[in-house]
Image (cartoon, grey):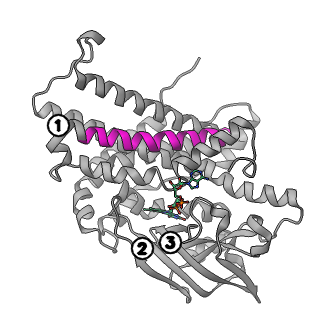
């Protein structure tokens, strides 16, 4: 039997986070959207401590797999949590120190000594460069071994939390001639000489989070700050697998980004229903199709789009928890939810007319915040390309 209800433990956390979003994040939404300041909203430090967001649970996963059981683990919990927090505010969610996009990459491989040395993690993730966006294998930042250090050189752009974070996970190549297999990630603590934040962007949406350009000029980090295996695979086959492994981390993170759109769309729909009700507009979803108003029909469609995306996200996360290959599902969930978030938020603005467009309410902000979810962590077009490759059984060189 298929049961699409959330497990009780996750449902309990969800309703707790809804309260956190409603009482902790929402009251700050407009203030920090308007301020678009570089500095961290002070309230977020305290709020972040309350959260204690968990990661994957590899041991529990292995144990359950050995018994042939399903587990509802870290990925499912995280997508539900991300959606709830983004129901509150996507920009503030991204600014929470415990959410740092590089945190998971570091936690997965850091030794206890490194964890103690680096302290509380608030790690940004710096992949994108002026000449490398969708094609992350095209990065030109280099890391050269010199004695006991790696020396990093290059420019990273559009780094979420790049200004406020305490550490930056930098993607760099050990040898540009070796192609994507030579790409490794390095933990660079803020304050390391040679790493400079050179610009903070002004943006359409998610204005309460910072997005920065970072320049690395002869920036030295200890050898041990290379996260993962320092070897460059020797054979062509092993090299292909090595970068495939790097890309597979996106199979966990894409459903989480997709979940941001699910939370935002729910927020837009909830606010729309609230505003309509306050205007005395009664909606009756029990009516038959032939009696339904255009408004009721629109809202039905939006709810259906929302639910489709939500279920795709839950499935992709559940597959990751249970060790099932989920590249196709992760990309489907990201493409669908990214698109749905834009459509739902804009349509809600349209439905509510002046109230939707005015800064008196948050609908116009939801619409502005929604676009980035369709772009970062791989654009909608790139997700569709990945799905097409999986469906047609083509490699990335066969279908570009
Ligand atoms: C606010 C914000 C925050 C960000 N945060 C981070 C971050 O924390 N870390 C980080 O590393 N990066 C971050 N990014 C960068 C983001 O991941 C990239 O913008 C994204 O990957 C797209 O790259 P690009 O902008 O260079 O676009 P391009 O790759 O130049 O693409 C331009 C357009 O062409 C389309 N396109 C490209 N290739 C293909 C193809 N083969 N087939 C079909 N269509 C294609 C794309 O879908 C897009 O519509 C952020 C960006 C923004 C705007």
Looking at the image, the residue that sits furthest to the right is: 235
Query: Mark 1 touching mark 3, by CB under 8 A?
Result: no
For marks 3 and 2, give the CA distance.
15 Å
> Magenta segment, which residues?
322-349
* Mark 2 close to ligand 1, CB under 8 Å: no
| Nearer to us in this view, 218 or 318 | 218
Q: Is mark 3 within 8 Å of ligand 1?
A: yes
Q: In the shown orientation, is residue 345 left or right of residue 178?
A: left
Q: Is residue 345 magenta?
A: yes
Q: Which mark is residue 316?
A: none
Q: Of callouts 1 and 2, which one flags the residue occurring earlier in the amino acid sequence? A: 2
The residue tagged 1 is 275
Q: Residue at x 37, y 53 (%)?
A: 90
Magenta stretch secondary structure, dominant: helix
Expressed as whole percent of the image width and height from the top left, the position of residue 176 reads: 74, 74
**Spatial distance from mark 1 to mark 3, Cα to Cα?**
39 Å
Among all residues in the image, which is located at the extreme left?
280
Look at the picture and state if 156 lies above or below 25. below
Looking at the image, residue 192 lies above or below residue 135: below
The residue indicated by pointer 2 is 164
Image quadrant occupied by the N terminus: top right
Q: Position of residue 399 (x, y in %)?
A: 70, 47
């Amino acid at each position: 039997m298929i049961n699409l209800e959330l497990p009780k433990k996750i449902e309990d956390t969800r309703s707790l986070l809804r309260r956190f979003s409603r009482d902790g994040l929402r009251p700050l939404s407009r203030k920090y959207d308007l301020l678009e300041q570089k500095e961290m909203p002070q309230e977020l430090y305290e709020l972040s401590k309350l959260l204690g967001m968990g990661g994957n649970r590899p041991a529990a996963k292995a144990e359950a797999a050995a018994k042939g059981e399903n587990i509802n683990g870290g990925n499912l919990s995280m997508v539900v949590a991300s959606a709830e927090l983004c129901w509150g505010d996507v920009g503030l969610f991204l600014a929470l120190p415990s959410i740092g996009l590089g945190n998971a990459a570091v936690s997965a491989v850091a030794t206890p000594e490194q964890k103690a040395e680096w302290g509380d993690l608030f790690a940004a993730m710096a992949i994108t460069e002026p000449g490398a966006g969708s094609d992350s294998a095209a990065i030109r930042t280099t890391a050269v071994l010199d004695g006991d250090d790696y020396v990093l050189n290059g420019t990273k752009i559009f780094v979420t939390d790049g200004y406020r974070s305490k550490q930056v996970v930098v993607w760099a190549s050990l040898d540009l001639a070796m192609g994507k297999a030579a790409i490794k990630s390095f933990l660079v603590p803020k304050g390391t000489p040679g790493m400079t934040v050179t610009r903070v962007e002004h943006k359409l949406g998610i204005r309460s989070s910072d997005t920065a350009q970072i320049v690395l000029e002869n920036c030295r980090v200890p050898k041990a700050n290379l996260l993962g295996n320092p070897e460059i695979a020797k054979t062509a086959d092993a090299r292909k697998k090595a970068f495939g492994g790097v890309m597979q981390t996106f199979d966990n993170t894409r459903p989480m980004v997709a979940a941001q759109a699910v939370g935002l769309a729910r927020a837009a729909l909830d606010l729309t229903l609230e505003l309509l009700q306050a205007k005395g507009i009664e909606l009756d979803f029990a009516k038959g199709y032939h009696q339904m108003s255009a408004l009721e029909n629109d809202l039905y469609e939006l709810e259906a789009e929302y639910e489709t995306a939500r279920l795709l996200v839950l499935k992709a996360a559940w597959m990751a928890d249970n060790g099932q290959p989920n590249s196709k599902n992760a990309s489907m969930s990201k493409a669908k939810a990214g698109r749905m978030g834009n459509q739902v938020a804009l349509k809600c603005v349209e439905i509510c007319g002046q109230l939707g467009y005015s800064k008196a309410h948050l609908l116009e902000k939801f619409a502005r915040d929604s676009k980035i979810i369709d772009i970062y962590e791989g654009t909608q077009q790139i997700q569709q390309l990945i799905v097409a490759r999986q469906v047609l059984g083509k490699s990335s060189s066969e279908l570009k």
